[in-house]
Structures are given as structure tokens and as C-alpha cells.
Image (spheres, grey):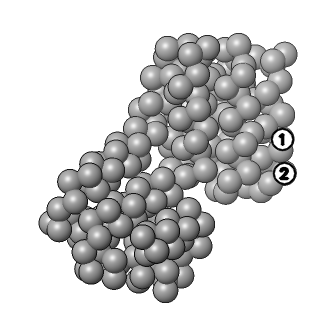
Amino acid sequence: MSSCDVTRFSEIILDTTRPISERFSTLLKLGTIPGEQKIEAISKLFSDKSILLKHECAYVLGQTQNPTAIPVLIKNLKDEDQDVITRHECGLKCGSSLFRHEIAYVLGQLQNELSIDALKESCECELEAPMVRHEAVEALSSIGLPRAMDVLRGILKSDTTESVVIDSCLVGCSL
């Protein structure tokens, strides 16, 4: 599938004159296309009138496991104008990374050396959500022991391209 498919599928899912069943099945197809272009298209469905489509929109975004989708899910989770079922699905789909983010935060607050290995694993994992990696870096900085700081310096020497992780390491190393 190509960017032409993303464009065509996007037009279908956003066309409120089409049958809900067609829009629904097209949304599921759109979710299977690799890449980030689909995230923006799917995200537009959160303004639709159909609660079912918005719920599935959250489901499909979560299934992509694309970090770009997480801020969209969090935004709609917090949006009190969204229906409860939509907000619930947003919470479920971003929950695991949000939960890991909170765990990293708590480990940083504990400032325990025993947390270093787990935090190192989180912040070095390129597949982890940027917000989780950022929080793991901050937690290591908070621990402040030489071994924790070595992890931050190691990340700065690595091939990571995630700006929030790099910036967090730079700040952490300067404190």
C-alpha cells in the first residue's frame, strides 16, 4: 500500500455521506498501512459525530504502536467533550506507555541505585515512547550517581535521534 492509499482511505473515513460500515472497514484498512502519514488522517476522526468511529479511531491509533499517536490519544483522553467510551479507549491505548512513564518518574523520586539498570534499559530502547525515555533519563539524572550519569553520557554518544531524549541527557549531565 502507498501514500495514495492513505490519501484515498483518508477521504473515505472523513466523508460523512458514506455508510458507517464503509468508513469503519476503511479505517481498519488504513491502520494497516505502515508509516506516520496515516496518524494525522486517523486523528481527524476524533471530531466526527460517530462515537463508534471515534472509539475505533483510538483503537487503531493504539494498535499502530507509533509514538506519534500517543500525544493524540492523551489529548483526546483529557478532552471532556469526548464521549466516555472514546476517552476510555484512548486511555487503554496510551496507558501502557503512560504507565511506564509514571513508573520512571517514581523511580527517579526514589533515587535508588537499584533502579539504574531498569531505567537504562528504558532510555536506551529506541522502540520505547519518547516520553518514557525522557522520564527515564530524568530519573537517572535525579539518582545522580556516577553509574547513572555514565548511562546519560552513553546515550549522547549513541545513534539516538530523538530530540527530547538528547536534550534531557544534555540537561541531566549539566546538573
Q: Which mark is residue 128?
A: none
How crowded is the residue under tag 1: few (<14 C-alpha within 10 Å), some, or many (20+)?
few
Tag 2 and tag 1, C-beta contact below 8 Å = yes
Judged from the image, the secondary structure of the residue bearing numbered disc 2 is: helix
The answer to whether residue 52 of the structure is visible from this angle is: no
Q: Is residue 131 left or right of residue 96?
A: right
Q: Which residue is labeled 1 in the image?
A: 8
User: Residue 82 location in percent, x, y?
Assistant: 59, 17
Give the residue type that dot 1 points to. Answer: Arg
Cα gap from disc 2 to disc 1, whole angstroms: 6 Å
How crowded is the residue under tag 2: few (<14 C-alpha within 10 Å), some, or many (20+)?
few
Vertical side of 78 occupied by 85: above or below: above
Q: Nearer the viewer, residue 42 or 94?
A: 94
**Residue positioned most to the front:** 175
Residue 139 picture quarter = bottom left
Give the residue type that dot 2 points to. Answer: Cys
Q: Which residue is labeled 2 in the image?
A: 4
Q: Nearer the viewer, residue 85 or 26?
A: 85
- For the point 32% across and 62% down, which residue is it? 142
User: Residue 136 location in percent, x, y?
Assistant: 37, 60
Question: Quadrant of the image for the C terminus?
Answer: bottom left
- For the point 17% across and 62% down, which residue is it? 112
Residue 10 picture quarter = top right
